[in-house]
Amino acid sequence: MAIDTVFAEYQPKGQPGAALGVIKDGKLVYAQGYGRANLEYQASNTPDTVFHVASVSKQFTCFAILLLTEDGRLKLDDDIRKHLEWMPDFGTTISIRHLMLHTSGFDFTPVNTGGGDGNSLTININPAGFPPFPPITIVPVSITVGGQPATYVSRPSLYVIHATFDSSVLSAGTYPILVTMPTPGGNMVFTAQNSVTIPAP
């Protein structure tokens, strides 16, 4: 077929390639694989090769949702639990629009401001300025650093959490920060975007 010449450069042995499908009048009229799907195992691409598209799928998912919106089958401000009944109740509405725009209202960006015998953390919730889900209230949270619970945690405002932890119980290294927040549907655990680094003595 003439289109094979377009993909001829993918045919040499060891060359990464692609899979092609041609659809006409709603029917698949031609399908072919070109080049390698896996260079380590020299596996060839076929019309049935599954490609890991990762986050590229988000664009197509959003487009499909907009088509459903045009058809009147859903609304962007629908509670996601209307369509995903298995989702737990987090105590406030999470809409389809929130997910499409990545505006969850929770964006933990901690800043390590401490030193000496202990470390103090200031965790800014939602520093990008997106409005949080109303009507979120100031609820207690727990903080762990490297599996060690913080010795003191306070939440002076909706957007700020202060925590103090004892770095002397941790060896030198980099540790994740976990924030646990209770909700009516169970605890929500967030991994902070930043981590804590304990320097070698």
Image: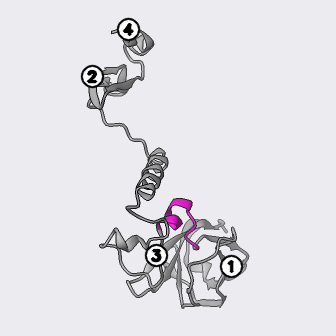
Viewer-nearest of labels 2 and 1?
2
Q: Secondary structure at mark 2?
A: strand
Residue underneath mark 4: 2
Label 4 amino acid?
A: Ala
The Cα–Cα distance between marks 4 and 3, rounded to whole angstroms, is: 54 Å
> Residues under labels 3 and 2: Cα distance?
48 Å
Q: Is residue 67 above or below residue 192?
A: above
- The magenta span reads 96-105
N-term-proximal mark, 4 vs 3: 4
Whichever of callouts 1 and 4 sits on the residue coming sooner in the sequence is 4
Q: Is residue 44 left or right of residue 188?
A: left
The amino acid type of the residue labelled 1 equals Thr
Here the colouring is one colour
- Per the image, the residue denoted by label 2 is 29
Q: Quadrant of the C terminus?
A: bottom right
Image position, residue 77 (x, y; %): 49, 70
Q: Nearer the viewer, residue 192 or 128?
A: 128
Residue 95 coordinates in the image, percent (x, y): 48, 71
Q: Earlier in the sequence, mark 3 or mark 1?
A: 1
SS category of the residue bearing label 3: strand
Q: Which numbered dot is residue 189?
A: 3
Q: Amino acid at mark 3?
A: Val
Disc nearer the start of the sequence (3/2): 2
For marks 3 and 1, give the CA distance: 17 Å
Q: Name which residue type carries label 2.
A: Val
Circles 3 and 1: CB atoms closer than 8 Å: no
Residue sitting nearer the eye, 48 or 199: 48
